[in-house]
Amino acid sequence: MAKLDALIVGAGFAGLYMLHKLRQDGFSAHVVEAGSGVGGTWFWNRYPGARCDIPSIEYSYSFDAELEQEWTWTERYASQGEILRYLEHVADRFALRDGITLNTKVTAARWAEQAGRWTVSTETGTSIDAQFLILATGALSEPKAPDLPGLDQFKGPVLHTARWDERIDLAGKRVCHFGIGSSGIQAVAEMSKTAAQLTVFSRTPSFAVPANNRPLEQGESAAAKQTYPQMREVARRSPLGFAAPPRPGSGKAFAPPDREQRLEEAWNAGTTGLLNAFEDLLFDEESNAHAAQFARRKIAETVTDPETARKLTPQGYPLGSRRLCSEIGFYEAMNRPHVTLVDVREEPVVAITADAIITSTGTYPADAISFATGFDACVGAIKAIAITGRGGLEIADEWAGGPRTYLGLAVSGFPNMFTITGPGSPSVLSNVIISIEQHVEWIARCITDMRTGGKSMIEAEPAAEAAWMEHVDEVSQQTLFPRGDSWYKGRTADGRQVFMPYVGGVGTYRAKCDEVAAAGYAGFALA
Ligand code: FAD
Ligand code: NAP
């Protein structure tokens, strides 16, 4: 491969748009992707029931008005298959495929001090020379599975939602499933329809609201297409990256019947509805507790067995401080006679045999095991690459005490390297597509400004980076987010927890990034 202006790692929403944007702006760029197809999250997560939980009309690219007009979503929350088809369409429509190498994992990247360029190495033995290294590796792309005793003895298939093999048919099988976060809640509902027996091993129960998914009527799509520009602009300036704003009023200020009515409306409005029920829901404990209690009551009303309902009822953390899940028939699935719930906090797994899971009190026969046990979120895919910056700095060592970035976009000691939706940016606590587009456009503008200004190197200044991370932490402490034990927090080598996303608001964050650029990239050293 000839010398590149930019090497992009990952061909999900972020990598595809980054490639298109840089090509449009006149740079040579190439994408390297580990998977055998484009799509990232939507290529890998093929488990039954996988779909987005932000309405597709909003969970889609906004950078091209023609693309918006020509693509029609069939459902309010599109399925994995439909989102993947959309991303394949984007790759074809913008003629991106010749700029993407598939089936190739990037294993290392080294900053060559003298040359002021990156040397990137892949699993297939290629070496790529690029001025800029852009990590579009995804915040939720490095799956995690528990190290259960005896798992290697198990004779049947072992699946992970983020590496699902669709060829394995679970119909009529005895399935033992672990994890009821967003992925597990979707997968359990679907698997329960065909499995002969489904045993669900849970640890921390989630709050989940009904998705109220439905086909999109033609008139509805046409109306959305008419208002795309306004809707996207509102989303770009909003707190969480979607158009509907939090409803005014504190949850504490309502008389109980009015509060109940507001919560009922929010409950029926789909995933983004409940978080928007009160303007202070994510800030005020009492206001949040009203919504949490409402959601707990819904579980008690839906789940028929009181013991199962107890185990499924979240306690001890504010609603929204762990990802609010979206469900379609999950609680009904838990009522089915062939579905059993095991809480591993009360009944830990002690062994796995060739055909069963054994807990402290029971034996659960299994033909297949499925894990929906999450990701090494926000940092995992970046730390998995041996990235060596200035003076031999290794990213994994540098982040052992928690990730540090300037604006979630750059890391001091790692010149000409950008992270799309990196830790310290709104990323996973927003409509991620809005956040991806903002980062892609900021990075492209930065590289263009460098070219115009005759600069070849950019690096975050340590002081600006430290101040930003302090700000990220400070802002999170003003909310209820850190009160939950969630994957939003990274664990450091010495056991501390660091809250990773920036929760000051998508709009506020965008303004800050624009301000930095307008001030000649304040907080960055340019050479
Ligand atoms: P990804 O889509 O994760 O793509 C990253 C790509 O980089 C992957 O294909 C990976 O293989 C590749 N890669 C990583 N490391 C390497 C390497 N070393 N070498 C080569 N390739 C590499 N967000 C929302 O806002 N709304 C939703 O409703 C929503 N639903 C989700 C549902 C699921 C099941 C999951 C898992 C996540 C969901 N998300 C959602 C978050 C989702 O990850 C983002 O919305 C978005 O798809 C991320 O795009 P990306 O391009 O940044 O990363
Ligand atoms: P997750 O939210 O991290 O959930 C993993 C679950 O597995 C947690 O409840 C965890 O419990 C549990 N677990 C881990 N080890 C276990 C064990 N040994 N035994 C039993 N349970 C165990 O991961 P995810 O569900 O894959 O979702 C990750 C993120 O992806 C979501 O938060 C969301 O951002 C995105 N996503 C979105 C959608 C959508 O609807 N749009 C769908 C899927 C994913 P502990 O918390 O106790 O560790």
Image (spheres, rainbow, N blue to C red):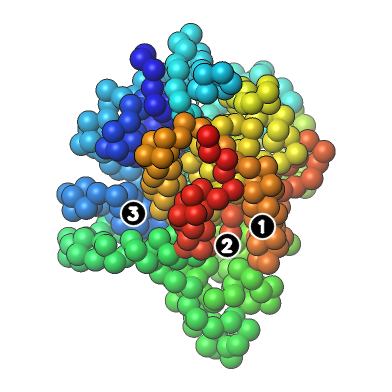
Tell me if residue 446 comes above or below residue 240 in the rendering. Answer: above
Q: Position of residue 338 (x, y in %)?
A: 54, 45
- Secondary structure of residue under mark 1: helix
- Depth check, mark 2 against mark 1: the one in front is 1
* Mark 2 vs 1: CB contact within 8 A: yes
* Mark 1 vs 3: CB contact within 8 A: no
Query: On the image, numbered disc 1 is attached to which residue?
Result: 471
Query: On the image, numbered disc 2 is attached to which residue?
Result: 504
Q: Earlier in the sequence, mark 2 or mark 1?
A: 1
Regarding residue 150, the answer to whether it shows in the image is yes
The amino acid type found where label 3 is placed reads Ser
Taking depth in this image into account, of 387 and 351 the one nearest to the observer is: 387
Crowd class of label 3 (few under 14; some 14 to 19; many from 20; radius 10 Å): some
Query: On the image, numbered disc 3 is attached to which residue?
Result: 56
Q: Earlier in the sequence, mark 3 or mark 2?
A: 3
Taking depth in this image into account, of 274 and 165 the one nearest to the observer is: 274
Taking depth in this image into account, of 256 and 4 the one nearest to the observer is: 4
Task: Classify residue 36 as left or right of residue 90.
Answer: right
Residue at image x 58%, y 59%? Answer: 503
Q: Position of residue 416 (x, y in %)?
A: 51, 32
Based on the displayed image, in which of its 4 quarters is residue 233 positioned? bottom left
Q: Is the CB–ligand 1 distance for label 3 below 8 Å?
A: no
Residue at image x 29%, y 38%? Answer: 25
Q: Is the CB–ligand 1 distance for label 2 below 8 Å?
A: no
The amino acid type found where label 1 is placed reads His
Task: Classify residue 62 as left or right of residue 525.
Answer: left
Tell me if residue 488 comes above or below residue 121 in the rendering. Answer: below
Image disc number at residue 494: none
Q: Position of residue 375 (x, y in %)?
A: 59, 38
